[in-house]
Amino acid sequence: MRDYLKTGITLMVITIIAALVLSVVYTIVEEPIANAELGAKLKAIREVLTDSDTGELLIDEESIPQTATELAKFEWLPQGFSPSEGIIYRTEDNQGKVESPAYKFVKEDGTEIFIAIGIAVGYGGDVKSMAAFVKEPDGVKLNGIKVLEYSQETPGLGANIANADVQKRFYPVSKEGLDKGIRVDKDAGVTPVGDQIDARKREDGIVTVSDVMTGATITPRAVASSLNAISEFLDKAGVR
Amino acid sequence: MMAESKFKILANGILKQNPTFIQVLGMCPTLATTTSAENGLGMGLATTAVLALSNITISLVRKFIPDKIRIPSYIVIIASFVTVIDMLMHGFVYDLWKTLGLFIPLIVVNCIILGRAEAFASKNDVFSSFLDGLGMGLGFTASLVLLGSVREFLGNGSIFGYHLSDVKMFAMILPPGAFIALGMLAAFFNYLGIRRSKVKKAEK
């Protein structure tokens, strides 16, 4: 009996000390973790706000949010939408989702820029991409994207989506391209080469990835669906 | 004499008792994380930190823990250190945490750590246990970097992200490549070990 009590108490003491240590460390790192997450998001926002044709920022340097409170000012919730479980919009086939909140920036000349994070299922889990859409007089175009979450994709194959050169294959896309829907070259049934890569993406929404991501189709397909989900969401919100 | 034996403890893990190629311990993270040299280095260093810290702690408390509950106690201690490292990496080295993400919690079940706790730290003094943890950790890191470099070079034509060749055999980055590369390297190191011991025998 005494033996049981002794082992039980020893184990209890060890677990209590472990829990104490963990809670102390958690309190210390809580803020740096939140900052790191926010920093990654703000960096992505800055990247998608860079004009994909000229390489210049779409809005003033000073207007780009630097803190959580500044970012919160740009949150945008169109009428008729109510976010549930962090999701603001789901496509009908449930393939793509749009994360809440979405953001809206306004350029000096009144041009509206919409930023949202789209989610679609990739090879091993959710693939999240941030995208910026610019409302120009002749329609909404896709300006830039940044793939944020791809940790479940196959390293060396699908995870190559992290490469900036691969992500460049997804933008810019004009209004016509968005109307047709963004899809990877394999699904479109054509493989553009040379100058065609850029032209077909811009005008037809055909994203060529088979040369830069050979053997991985599911991950870029997920990115394409998430972009289409955001485009559909903007459509339903009356922006397009 | 004293300093020499301490050095032996440290060097033991790096070469003679290399955890990956000789002891063949901790195969799950070895196979899974070595898709590139950088991932191997990150995983190896995180494991080294956990190994050294848990060895110190277990050596400190070894006299208070009854024999019956030593395994659960070690697991609690190891899991706590892994969680601490995971949180610290999340907060301070976000990019590395993002790439290793899934594998950090896996350090808990890395049998090198429990193995060293059971075989060494529970029987030796604090300083020796620390050296043992450090040596084993560095040996593990070196093997992961080597394996990661071989796989990255063959599969992606680069090492640590530096472009070296245009030959890309994707299979080397995928799971089969892990087994092939690990098997070849383990065979090579065991061949060296066997040859050396034969030479020694012949000298005697």
Image: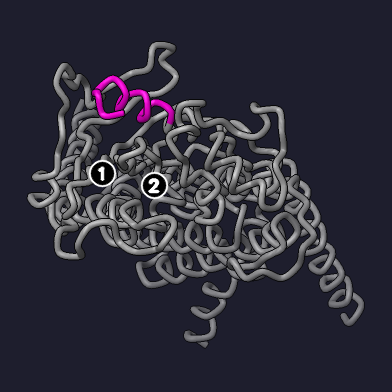
- Chain hosting mark 2: A
Q: Say which element carries label 2.
A: strand
Q: Nearer the viewer, residue B160 or B182?
A: B160
Badge number at residue A113: 1
Q: Which residue is mark 2?
A: A143
Which residue reaches farthest right?
B202
Badge number at residue A141: none
Q: Say which element carries label 1.
A: strand
Whether the magenta-drawn stretch holds residue A236 is answered as yes
Q: Are marks 2 and 1 in contact (CB under 8 Å)?
A: yes
- Chain hosting mark 1: A
Q: Is residue A196 visible?
A: yes
Cα distance in 3D space between marks 2 and 1: 9 Å
**What is the crowding at mark 2: few (fewer than 14 residues within 10 Å), some, or many (at least 20)?**
many
Quadrant location, the C terminus of chain A: top left
- Could you tell me how many numbered marks the image carries? 2
Q: Which residues are magenta?
A: A228-240
Quadrant location, the N terminus of chain A: top left
**Which of the colour schemes (rainbow, by chain, secondary structure, one colour) is used?**
one colour
Q: Amino acid at mark 2?
A: Asn
Q: Nearer the viewer, residue A155 or A1?
A: A155
Residue A45 x, y percent position in the rendering = 28, 51
Q: Is residue B73 visible?
A: no
Task: Decide whether the magenta segment is chiefly helix, strand or loop.
Answer: helix
Q: Which residue is rendered at x = 53% and y = 54% of the image?
A: A163
Q: Amino acid at mark 1?
A: Ile
Residue B105 x, y percent position in the rendering = 40, 43
Q: Is residue B192 above or below residue B76?
A: below
